[in-house]
Amino acid sequence: MPSSEEWTDPAHVARYRQRAASEDRPVTSDEALLEHVPAQARRVLDLGTGDGRLLALVLDGQPHRSGVGIDFSDLMLAAARQRFAGMQHVELVQHDLQEPLPQLGTFDAVVSSLAIHHLEHERKRSLYAEAFELLAPGGLFANFEHVASPSQRLHVEFFAAIDEPLECEDPSDRLLDVETQLRWLREIGFEDVDCHWKWRELALFAGVRPPRGAARAHGRAQIAIRIAQETDWSSIWPFFNEIVAAGETIGYSRELHCEEARELWLGGPPGRTCVALGAAGEVLGSARMHPNRGGQGGHIASATFMVDPAHQGRGIGRALVLDALDWAARAGFRGMQFNAVVATNTAAIALYESLGFEIVGTVPGGFRHPVHGFVGLHVMYRPIEQ
């Protein structure tokens, strides 16, 4: 029956009225979050656990679960230790979320409540990426958060609604709208991203790491990675040249000619060059990976990545780095080292740190930046499990 005629059907109208009358039960943010935690989840991480309230809710009545809560506040952690006294399945870790997450293992769910909004926006995004990497395939990330109103009038109304004077607004708040954070989650690679509960400036949003073997979505495009061919150079060179000529992130000569660049980038074994492709087969980025050095240092890999500036923010760089790590592991390398990460290239540093790399040294003034002058050059490293 066409939809325009359904409302002339007495049975359809009766079903709708009955359903509408039964859908008046308010759902709290806690209930909404707990609904989405996988029933089989065994290990849960709470970011900014505070006194442990949310972690306790997630663990309540679930004897098969264990939890890790992290927070930087001595006072909050003292309260959490009191709450979880005698519970061997709960671990509390002191850590400031402004810093990259420590190595904590793999989790089936990562949750947070009213904590991440205190971070600068760039750190929020990198933290979401770090959470993604900590999750097992199919794992949930859920964040109950204080978010930005779309207007100052609604912001004022929110404080009136919670009976709080606007002048008492927390100066440490760094509020951001829901839409931007949902987009970030999708770009990082989360699936089923949605805002599941919202009241004024309070919102619960979540995403799921794709199950093992599933294609990872980056924004709206599926990214495929394959070995580069000679015929790809005509697609690589325009953005390669743009990035190198800018002189802000790569140490190659800004006057590098096309043929010199081709020989450098498409060199053969023992190195490997790959390209990231969009849904239509277009080249979105490229990576060159190889042993960091020969001889006694040949067991450490290195790599350089370039993403077309027109396609940044779609998870292409992350896909290329993950592919390089997978290649290095299959080739038997014991670690990967980046020798020259420009200190002002904060987006790349955040990406690498979210994937387990650490800054192990810095050459002060090692890079001549066209805008910032002499800036630091980081050496970043990450071991590779065999």
Image: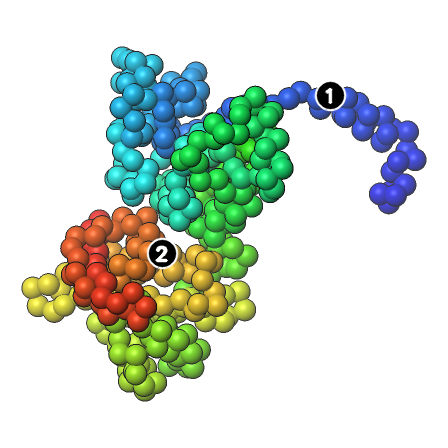
Helix, strand, or loop for circle 1?
helix
The residue carrying pointer 2 sits among few (fewer than 14), some (14 to 19) or many (20 or more) residues within 10 Å by Cα, namely: some
Q: Which mark is residue 177?
A: none
Q: Is residue 137 above or below residue 217?
A: above
Q: Is residue 264 above or below residue 121?
A: below
Q: Position of residue 181 (x, y in %)?
A: 50, 45
Helix, strand, or loop for circle 2?
helix
Residue at (71% x, 22% y) in the render: 24
Residue at (32% x, 19% y) in the render: 80
In the rendered view, does 224 fall on the left or right side of 245? right
The residue carrying pointer 1 sits among few (fewer than 14), some (14 to 19) or many (20 or more) residues within 10 Å by Cα, namely: few
Q: Nearer the viewer, residue 24 or 273?
A: 24
Q: Earlier in the sequence, mark 1 or mark 2?
A: 1
In the rendered view, does 221 fall on the left or right side of 174? right
Q: Is residue 162 above or below residue 178?
A: above
- Residue 235 seen in the figure: yes
Residue at (45% x, 71% y) in the render: 283
The residue at which mark 1 appears reads as 22
Give amino acid for label 2.
Ala
Q: Is residue 62 above or below residue 157?
A: above
The residue at which mark 2 appears reads as 347
State the count of labels: 2
Q: Residue furthest front?
A: 167
Q: Position of residue 266 (x, y in %)?
A: 31, 78
